[in-house]
Amino acid sequence: MLVRQAYRFALNPNDRQRGRLASHAGGARYAYNLGLEWLKKSLGDNPKGANAALEGAFEMHRRWNRWKKDPANGVRWWSDNSKCVYQEAFIDLERAVKAFFASRRGKLRGQRFGFPRFKHKGKSRDHFRLTGLIRLGPTWVQLPKLGVLRLNESPVKLLRRLDDGTARITSASVTREAQRWFVSFRVECKRPAAVPRTTDVVGLDVGVNALVTLSTGVVFAPPPALRSTLVRLRRLSKAHSRKKKQSANRRRSAQRLARCHARIAHLRRDSLHKLSTRLAKSHGQIVIEDLNVRAMVRNHRLARSIADASWGELASMLEYKCRWYGARLIRADQFFASSKTCSSCGYRKKTLALAERTFSCEGCGNVLDRDLNAALNLARWPEVAGSAPETQNACGGDVTPGRRQADLDEAGTEQPLAASGSEPIAQAVAFKVGPDDRRKGRVASGI
Ligand SMILES: [Zn+2]
């Protein structure tokens, strides 16, 4: 099967190259803002109004090609950067506008999209995308106009795939994250067709202390480095808040803080990738709770743990990895009381405080870990939903939980447009397995 995935590597540019990268990111931002200005003008007084016949990326790029050559517009720098940068920025803008209108019409589940906004230097993420001739070596990457840049880590897995012809790079997107530059290749990969395994069923519960508890009793703890980095984050944020505004000290502490945030994100993502790969490879059916993550983050006491456990991220990784490795992911309805129900006799508690870490049943006297109890209940979910029709292919419509904005900004990720008029049948939502799945644009970083 052909899947689209991303491989991401840290770059190691020299000072001159850093300047060139920043210039490209600036060019992309300029084109995006210019295109947005044009759109706003053509929409007139009613900027969020009806879906007027707006210029698409193609028309905007043609307009730009005339516009840039007019000396009155003062963009003599345009030729410093690759032409792809502008082209792709207009594509991003078109996509953002389409997402806004789709979201308004209720065609997009989950997150609601606002009207695109201007990007500000220093506030928006520095980012641009390149297509065309992209070459990769064991220690370097060659990008259009930018030339050869050193990689900070080995792309050996991707190289091997490129060599044996099972992968093809379609574009490269370059991003700055806390003073570091990363390149993310969008790759079309031929993966061996997964042989569906539906043998064992495992329930998976996301806990507050443990990252994940399985119904088999296996517990995955968050990496120890994450905890210590969180301590450091707290200290740095406090120190940062005391720095005088606009001072050089504050600027430096902001950079330290950003690096710490980036490290946490990397640690988290790394452990989630390892965990999800392991789960998708070793189980036939995985039942997870379809938590309304965004609603829970609004609860301030839970916010940290939910954000740390990165439930949504893990769920979306499991979604595509289960497809790759032939497992099946089942989402139990978010109102299924997996925590409050006794896994041994089915007695259902009325309330269960979050602080209660053990589950003790008033019906049969069963006492066990709270998360394990929930995982055991989830493992039985297919039986619970057994009365429903076979869900494997029943729902053509994809249910997409709130997606991270970053996902949508990522290289050419398709918008998760849900097919209208197809409500998930019963409560269990299974995912269609197949190359025509709309969510194949999932992004996985270099694994
Ligand atoms: Zn019981």
Image (tube, helix red, strand yellow):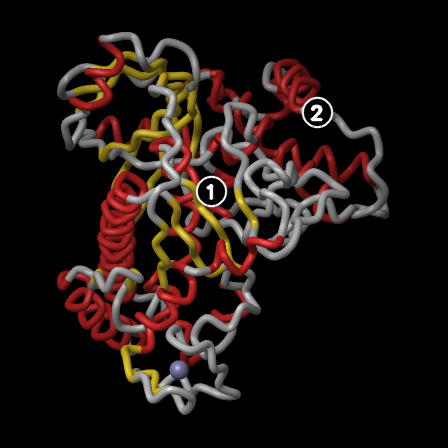
Q: Nearer the viewer, residue 240 or 441?
A: 441
| Depicted 392 relative to depicted 412: above or below | below
Examine the image and state in which quarter residue 443 appears.
top left
Residue at mark 1: C-beta within 8 A of ligand 1 = no
Say whether residue 34 is visible. Answer: no
Examine the rendered structure and indicate whether residue 183 appears above or below residue 59.
Answer: below
Image coordinates of residue 276 in percent, x first then y, are 30, 46
Q: What is the x, y in percent for residue 266?
A: 25, 50
Q: Quadrant of residue 26?
A: top left
- Amino acid type of the residue that numbered disc 1 sits on in the rendered structure: Asp
Q: Earlier in the sequence, mark 1 or mark 2?
A: 2
Q: Which mark is residue 56?
A: 2
Percent coordinates x, y for residue 32 in the rendering? 58, 34
Q: Of the numbered discs in the image, which one, if any, rests on residue 407?
A: 1
Q: 201 or 159: nearer the eye?
A: 201
Q: Secondary structure at mark 1?
A: helix
Q: Is mark 2 within 8 Å of ligand 1?
A: no
Query: Hey, what amino acid is under mark 2?
Result: Gly
Report the side of 299 relative to 343 (left or right): right
Q: Residue at x 24, y 8 (%)?
A: 164
Label 2 secondary element: loop
The picture quadrant for ligand 1 comes to bottom left
Quarter of the image where the C terminus is located: top left
Tell me residue 89's x, y (percent): 54, 29
Measure how far apart labels 1 and 2 are at the Cα level. Answer: 22 Å
Nearer-the-camera pick, 109 or 193: 193
Q: Residues within 10 Å of mark 1 (few under 14, many from 20)?
A: some
What residue is drawn where x is 51% and y is 20%?
A: 76
Going 55% across and 39% down the picture, which residue do you hit? 392
Q: In this orientation, does residue 435 appear?
A: yes
Decide: few, some or many residues near mark 2? Use Cα within 10 Å; few <14, some 14-19, many ≥20: some
- Quadrant placement of the N terminus: top left
